[in-house]
Image (spheres, rainbow, N blue to C red):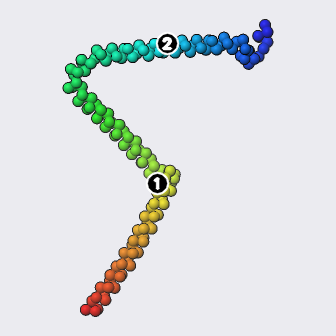
Amino acid sequence: MSDHSRPVSQALYDPSSTSSRQAVKFLTAVTIGATLLILSGLTLTGTVIALILATPVLVLFSPILVPAGIVLFLVAAGLVVSGGCGVVAMTALSWIYNYVTGKHPMGADRLDYARMRIADKARDMKERAKEYGQFVQHKAREATQGA
């Protein structure tokens, strides 16, 4: 009766119940661990037996299986690469769409900065070319007048 009148939190921390609780936890852990260890050993044994039985078959069919394995690997690699390229293309198109619609995707400010730098360089080169053209025309006139 006294256990029912105590709160649950006090009953959990009762020193007399902790040792039995720890014993139950230990026995549960040992039981589960032993079961998993036995299953692991059985799986390893079955795998080794299957490999021993399949080795002659693999040796006999290796002229067929090795090229088939290579072909399957190349096909799988091709599918993975093409899928990756598709994902990259969709991401790039999505980024371009967001940039064009003005949603300012990540990296757009760097692109704008690079575009401004290229435009400035192009303008500088245009001015230099114009100045150089005028310089060449001037030298050509001097050469024709001096001759």
Screen quadrant of the C terminus: bottom left
Q: Is residue 108 above or below residue 33?
A: below
- 8 relative position to 103: left or right: right
Residue 4 at x, y = what percent?
A: 77, 10
Count of marks placed on residues = 2
The kind of residue on which mark 2 rests is Thr
Residue 58, picture quadrant? top left
Front position in the image: 100 or 66 = 66
- 66 relative position to 124: left or right: left
Residue 35 at x, y = what percent?
A: 49, 12
- 28 relative position to 69: left or right: right
- 76 relative position to 96: left or right: left
Visible residue check, residue 8: no
Front position in the image: 51 or 99 = 51
Q: Which residue is mark 1?
A: 100
Tell me the number on the disc at residue 35.
2
Sequence order check: which comes first, mark 2 or mark 1?
Answer: 2
Q: Secondary structure at mark 2?
A: helix
The kind of residue on which mark 1 rests is Val
Residue 87, picture quadrant? top left
Residue 6 at x, y = what percent?
A: 78, 14
Q: Secondary structure at mark 1?
A: helix
Q: CA distance from mark 2 to mark 1?
A: 61 Å
Front position in the image: 83 or 20 = 20
Which residue sits furthest bottom?
146
Question: What's the residue at 31%, 89% (across, down)?
Answer: 142
Which residue sits furthest top?
1
